[in-house]
Amino acid sequence: MGRKERADRVEGGSPSHNTSLLHQKLQMLNCCIQKRAQGMKTAQDALDSGDARAEADEEEEEFFDAAEDSASEPDSSRQRRAPWNQPEGRLKPCGALRLLETGERMYIPVTQDVAPVTEDRQQEQSEVLVSLGTDAEGAQLRARMMGASLTSDMESFKAANPGSTLADFVRWYSPSDWVQDETDPSGQTGTAQLSARMRIKDNLWQEAWATCKPVPARRQRRLFDETREAERLLHQLLVEELEPDDLAAVGQQLGEAARRLQSAAKADWEASAYSAVGELLARCEHHVLRRRSLVLKLEGVQDKDKFVQQLIGGAEVAVPGGANGGAARHLEKMLTARQGLPPPVTKEYILRVTCARPGPGSRPLAQRLRCLISDQLFRVTASLSQDTMFS
């Protein structure tokens, strides 16, 4: 997530429910990265172009509303619209279709992409919908939650086609619900109308159309918030998998990583800004794995958790109970029987003593002798001190 490039070993696109949950979450992270990169590029293009986009839209409208079509359009369609009623978010003309009431050309709007979802997230949403119950109020609320994408598309359609009706939207969005009557015996073509399910009083489509406003997709509330989704996934992968003792040990480092990540996000996706965050997270992971490994190996030792924290946090620690305690015997058994620990690559012996040097009247000072032994190395080093005042 530290760079805008996707993870190359995970295929792109929406999460595939035929793969493992971890793989789906990695695919979702790819989607978040790609969406964020696209959003930043769009924002930068908008800053660079200024009013060029608005001028381009006007040119497209003049091109599509060609001279040969103007004669067949009603006078009202050629009148200049009010500033608050200008079309926005047009993608391209919708074939030869025209709006039923105004006779203007129908345009396909720019819409939001369908939000990708992982299998566990889909299950959570299903449980929420089921928990709403079967009464009328629950059914209505459930329909509204499921119709968020429909409402978004209606708002985009209204913005691109001022003066449109629900029938116009259905002709583009769900052509099967625009029923053409059979020709009558005299050979005249019958009229077209909405299907029976669309004519049901106060159905979801009618309510959504009546309440939604003409809002282009770029100004709508996002159906897929890539930032929030990525934060949720990272929280699952980095925090929810941690045990309480893990979180207590690396919680401060994770907080620092979050602060650095927030600062790096303002650095225009520079890869170097994320290197320190990656190193910090790697240290956290290494710390957690060491702690869990020691916990398993020291099972049965008294005050195990405290002893493990001391082993990880300090270079040298005192063994609980001393040389004859339970912890010492457990460690001796592990080392001698080699159950759980591999053969040592290097053996290290350290001897410490406090004695008076160079003479009996000198002050007692610390002395240290260190020995390293391996297959290809034998090294002895001494750190000796002597009293220069009372020698």
Image (cartoon, rainbow, N blue to C red):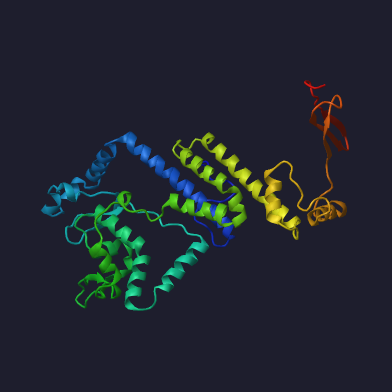
Residue 96, image x, y percentages: 26, 56
* Nearest the eye: 205 or 352: 352
Q: Nearer the viewer, residue 316 or 64?
A: 316
For the C terminus, the image quarter is top right
Q: Residue at x 23, y 64 (%)?
A: 210
Is residue 373 among what the camera can see?
yes
Query: In the rendered picture of this protein, how many numbered marks are placed on residues?
Result: 0
Out of 255 and 32, give the one closest to the viewer: 255
* Residue 287 picture location, percent across and down: 65, 47
Q: Is residue 268 above or below residue 93?
A: above
Residue nearest the observer in this picture, 236 or 271: 236
Instruction: Choose top left, top right, bottom left or bottom right for residue 354.
Output: top right
Q: Is residue 362 left or right of residue 64?
A: right
Vertical side of 359 occupied by 16: above or below: below
What residue sits 38% from the left and 56% below the top?
A: 223
x%, y% of residue 262? Answer: 47, 42
Q: Is 140 placed left or right of 118 in the picture? A: left
- Tell me if 335 is positioned left or right of 29 in this view: right
Residue located farthest toward the front when viewing the structure as drawn: 361
Q: Which residue is depicted at the point 82% across and 27% down?
A: 384
Residue 21 sits in quarter: bottom right
